[in-house]
Image (cartoon, helix red, strand yellow):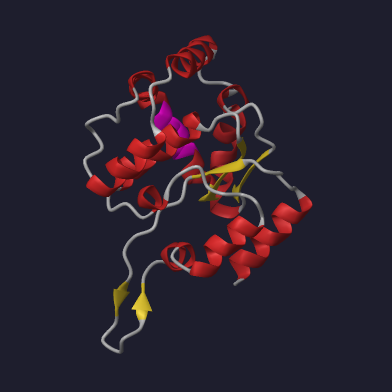
Amino acid sequence: LNVIVLFFFSFREFPIGNGKALQFIYSSKQFKTKGGLAAGTATTNVYRNAQFKKTMKAMCTPCCSPDEVIFGPDFHQSLYCHLLCGLIFRDEVQVVSSAFAHSIVHALRTFEQVWEALIVDIRDGVLSSRVTVPSIRLAMSKLLKPDPELADTIYNKCSRLSNWYGLIPELFPNTRYIYGIMTGSMEPYLKKLRHY
């Protein structure tokens, strides 16, 4: 409930209109305890809660990524697809978020390594063979269409960046802010996040 209140406050104070959120969110499987209660990580319980989706929809901040990516069983495949979805919807992205600053920095460091593969996927409209989970592949096939113009745009923007400085505003020009926990143990990641 506290997370939902925090989201409402944030998006009320910093509305993003009809845009999308590039959310680096991941949900593992829930399991049943011997007593029959659903258990899992805190984020799993939040993201799997029906109220979470209703809240995000009510705030007009749908996630770029389909549920199959968020609830995918493989972190690396989900991350790759989050990045791909962000690029597909790059002009609609108005907020980049994750629970923690570390997760955003990790995602963007991963982007540095896989950006050329992502461009190939966009150019050809075919998902990389590195993504093997059938449900994720099916969901992504509904979003991914050949788009050589977008691929060229992203290639040109990435090629012009110096040490990836300014990556977020360059790739996601309508981003209004980055949202996540950035205090306490997350403070060391702020320097790199500001770099992006």
Q: Residue at x 48, y 14 (%)?
A: 149
Residue 106 falls within the magenta-colored stretch: yes
Q: Residue at x 65, y 34 (%)?
A: 175
Name above or below for residue 167 compared with residue 1: above
Q: Residue at x 70, y 44 (%)?
A: 16
Residue 163 falls within the magenta-colored stretch: no
Specify whether 146 is left or right of 131: right
Furthest residue to the right? 13
- Position in image of residue 134 (x %, y %): 23, 46
- Position in image of residue 63 (x %, y %): 52, 47
Specify whether 187 is left or right of 146: right
Specify whether 151 is left or right of 2: left
- Position in image of residue 90 (x %, y %): 55, 30
Number of callouts in the render? 0
**In the foreground, 91 or 43:** 91
Rendering quarter of residue 57: bottom right
Q: Quadrant of the C terminus?
A: top right
Q: Start and end of the magenta stretch? A: 105-111
Name above or below for residue 191 compared with residue 64: above
Q: Residue at x 38, y 41 (%)?
A: 79
- Position in image of residue 121 (x %, y %): 34, 24
Q: Quadrant of the N terminus?
A: bottom right
**In the foreground, 73 or 185:** 73
Question: What secondary structure is the stretch in magenta mostly built from?
Answer: helix
Furthest residue to the bottom? 35
Rendering quarter of residue 125: top left
